[in-house]
């Protein structure tokens, strides 16, 4: 049974039980699912479970926004109503991934895609969506991807800084001047910038670099 079929069956049961609150929520959800299916493939279109979960998440987000708004307005009765509807909708969502599982799958996907910066975030998100299959909302997923891509960039800078430290120290040992080192692909200015970013003003003690 697909998720959309389950909603249909539960709607019929709500009608038999004369559960007006649940019936109202499921009718709105069924309409949203049908609209999404038509947008996807016309009047005879169907949604797979991953696509249906995305529709349900939008419905959940609407309730969450309404709850926040009504709480600010002191509308306790409407807050309670929206929370009841939210609890019904959440029964159709898959169990959320743990923070550790989410971190692991994001890390593995970044490696698979070969992403090294935020410029490739779109490619990472596209590869992640089918793997996550609705077990994490878009905001949480996006935040984790950004965090790990930033971490990867920082590690790259640190590795580059260590490499350039060795290069400059070696150049100093050979008696090269600071100007000469800077002329070798602009390494010296880059090194200084990265050291400042990392808060590590580590310079060689060679006389050629003491002026820095």
Image (cartoon, rainbow, N blue to C red):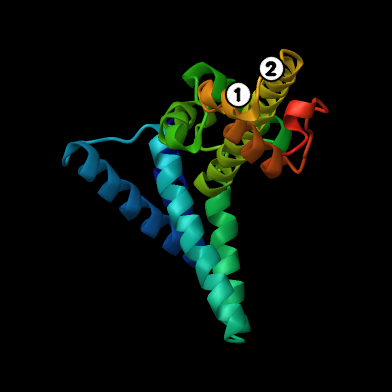
| 46, 112: nearer the viewer | 112
Q: Residue lying furthest left in this view? A: 42
Q: Quadrant of residue 205?
A: top right
Relative to 26, does residue 37 appear above or below in the rendering?
Answer: above
Residue 19 visible, this orientation = no
Q: Quadrant of residue 200?
A: top right
Pick the quarter of the image with the N terminus.
top left
Q: Is residue 205 left or right of residue 31?
A: right
Q: Position of residue 29 (x, y in %)?
A: 40, 54
Q: SS for tag 1?
A: helix
Residue 181: numbered disc: 1
Q: Which residue is mark 2?
A: 171
Residue at horizontal 50%, vertical 45%?
138
Q: Position of residue 133 (x, y in %)?
A: 50, 32
Distance between the alpha carbons at the discs numbered 1 and 2 = 7 Å
Residue at horizontal 73%, vertical 18%?
166
Q: Residue lying furthest right in this view? A: 205
Q: Position of residue 116 (x, y in %)?
A: 52, 27
């Amino acid at each position: 049974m697909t998720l959309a079929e389950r909603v249909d069956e539960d709607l019929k049961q709500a009608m038999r039980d004369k559960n007006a609150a649940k019936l109202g929520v499921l009718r709105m959800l069924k309409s949203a699912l049908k609209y999404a299916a038509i947008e996807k493939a016309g009047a005879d279109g169907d949604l797979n479970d991953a696509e249906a979960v995305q529709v349900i998440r939008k419905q959940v987000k609407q309730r969450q926004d309404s709850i926040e708004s009504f709480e600010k307005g002191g509308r306790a009765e409407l807050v309670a109503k929206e929370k009841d509807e939210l609890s019904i909708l959440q029964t159709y969502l898959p169990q959320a991934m743990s923070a550790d599982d989410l971190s692991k799958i994001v890390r593995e996907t970044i490696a698979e895609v070969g992403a090294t910066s935020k410029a490739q975030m779109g490619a990472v998100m596209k590869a992640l969506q089918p793997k996550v299959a609705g077990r994490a909302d878009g905001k949480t997923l996006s935040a984790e991807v950004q965090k790990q891509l930033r971490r990867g960039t920082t590690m790259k800078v640190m590795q580059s800084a260590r490499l350039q430290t060795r290069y400059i120290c070696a150049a100093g040992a050979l008696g090269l001047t600071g100007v000469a080192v800077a002329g070798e692909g602009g390494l010296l200015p880059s090194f200084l910038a990265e050291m400042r970013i990392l808060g590590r003003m580590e310079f060689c003690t060679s006389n050629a670099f003491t002026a820095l």
